[in-house]
Image: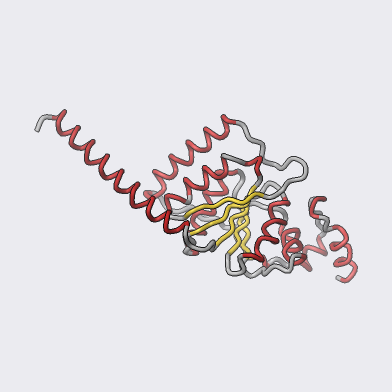
Amino acid sequence: MKPRKWLQRLGQIFLVSFLLWLLVLSLQLYLAASRPVDALLVLGGSIRREIYAAELSQDYPDAKILISNGSRDPCIWLIFDRANAAMKNVCLEKCAKNTFGNFYYTTPILKAWGVKHVKLITSTTHLPRAIWMARIHLGVRHIWVGLDTAQEKGIPGNREFWLKTILDVTRSLAWAIASPLLPAPECDRVQFLTEVDMQAWLKRGFKCEHQAQLNDIIKKLREGA
């Protein structure tokens, strides 16, 4: 077989294989989307997202909640305590430094949990970049991603412009292609909310974003500590 025909045949095999993979993946994601939500993924950048996630958790009592690079640990603890939300399902990931890192570190965690249907919690100012990246990183792992947004007051930490979106989406696509061949990233700063030592934090002292309106609660806890 001539080299040119061999390359054409190889290209055809690759194209058919890719289309079959895409078809199977689409079917798996369709089935995953029809399943109940089994995890909430909260992106850091605004304490309003954590407040909303605590309220929303009442609708998903069995779902795990993964907060990526969110507010300070005691602030999140107080938010969930005030909402009477179960803390045993809440996990804090603190390795991410940006939106790409949010998905880079949380995808292996969600995969290890056996999650199939995630609801992404962020702000409208973080879109469409956040949802596109989520569906790339998690989609190739057969995890469907739905979306819910927190109502913001003021301007959250995420500011969007198209160059950033294009670069992050391109980087996410490259990682999606390469990641099956590489070891899964691990974060060494992951803990469940029940492991947060509030007494130690109260002795050390801490502040939370004003929007959370936790100052009176913190004051009472310090007086009783």
Q: Could you say where residue 68 lies in the image, as x and y percent from the top left?
A: 61, 53
Seen as rendered, the residue at the extreme left is 1
Seen as rendered, the residue at the extreme right is 223
- The quadrant of the image that shows the C terminus is bottom right
**Location of residue 9 (image quadrant):** top left
Q: Is residue 106 left or right of residue 201?
A: left
Q: Could you say where residue 25 lies in the image, as x and y percent from the top left?
A: 37, 51
Q: Give the residue drawn at x 47%, y 59%.
A: 34
Establish if 83 lies above or below 128. Answer: below
Q: Give the residue drawn at x 63%, y 41%.
A: 126
Q: Could you say where residue 138 lies in the image, as x and y percent from the top left?
A: 48, 51
- The quadrant of the image that shows the N terminus is top left
Q: Could you say where residue 200 lies in the image, as x and y percent from the top left?
A: 77, 66
Q: Give the residue drawn at x 61%, y 56%.
A: 93
| Residue in front for this viewpoint, 14 or 112 | 14
| Residue in front for this viewpoint, 36 or 67 | 36
